[in-house]
Image (spheres, rainbow, N blue to C red):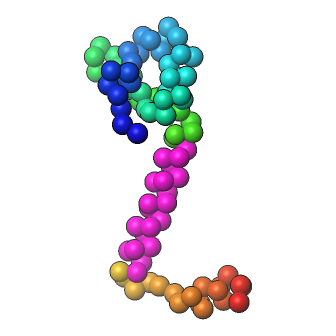
């Protein structure tokens, strides 16, 4: 999901003039849009589907990192212990 600067940098005034077109572009392109004011970035607009996907990916990566830290620190359970705790033996 890389930004195409020729298409994805939008002046804030464009959002004010035609919000539906700008939001539609974000949704259809599956890329975030950089909104600018006076030539400086002020906000990022992203389609809901892409936002949710990114949040799920971040949560997954955080869980993996936490799991790896638990293993490194010796906080682990055997498969039998997990099955017993979950009641699936």
Residue in view at x 47 percent, y 15 percent: 15
Please tell me in which quadrant of the rendered image residue 66 appears.
bottom left
Q: Residue furthest left?
A: 39
Please tell me in which quadrant of the rendered image residue 65 appears.
bottom left
In the rendered image, residue 73, in percent from the top left (x then y), is placed at: 37, 82
Asked whether 28 or 46 is in front, the reply is: 28
32 in relation to 74, above or below:
above
Dividing the image into 4 quarters, which one contains the N terminus? top left
Figure label count: 0
Residue 49 seen by the camera: yes
In the rendered image, residue 12, in percent from the top left (x then y), is placed at: 41, 15
64 in relation to 78, above or below:
above
Residue in view at x 71 percent, y 89 percent: 89
Residue 46 seen by the camera: no
Residue in view at x 40 percent, y 81 percent: 71
* Secondary structure mostly taken by the magenta-highlighted segment of the chain: helix
In the rendered image, residue 20, in percent from the top left (x then y), is placed at: 57, 16
What is the magenta range? 52-71
61 in relation to 14, above or below:
below
In the image, is residue 84 part of the stretch drawn in magenta? Answer: no
């Amino acid at each position: 999901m890389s930004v195409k600067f020729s298409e994805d940098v939008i002046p804030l005034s464009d959002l004010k003039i035609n919000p539906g077109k700008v939001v539609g572009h974000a949704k259809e392109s599956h890329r975030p849009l950089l909104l600018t004011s006076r030539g400086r970035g002020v906000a990022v607009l992203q389609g809901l589907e892409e936002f949710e996907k990114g949040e799920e990916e971040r949560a997954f990566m955080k869980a993996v990192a936490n799991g790896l830290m638990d293993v490194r620190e010796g906080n682990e359970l055997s498969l039998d212990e997990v099955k017993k705790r979950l009641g699936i033996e």
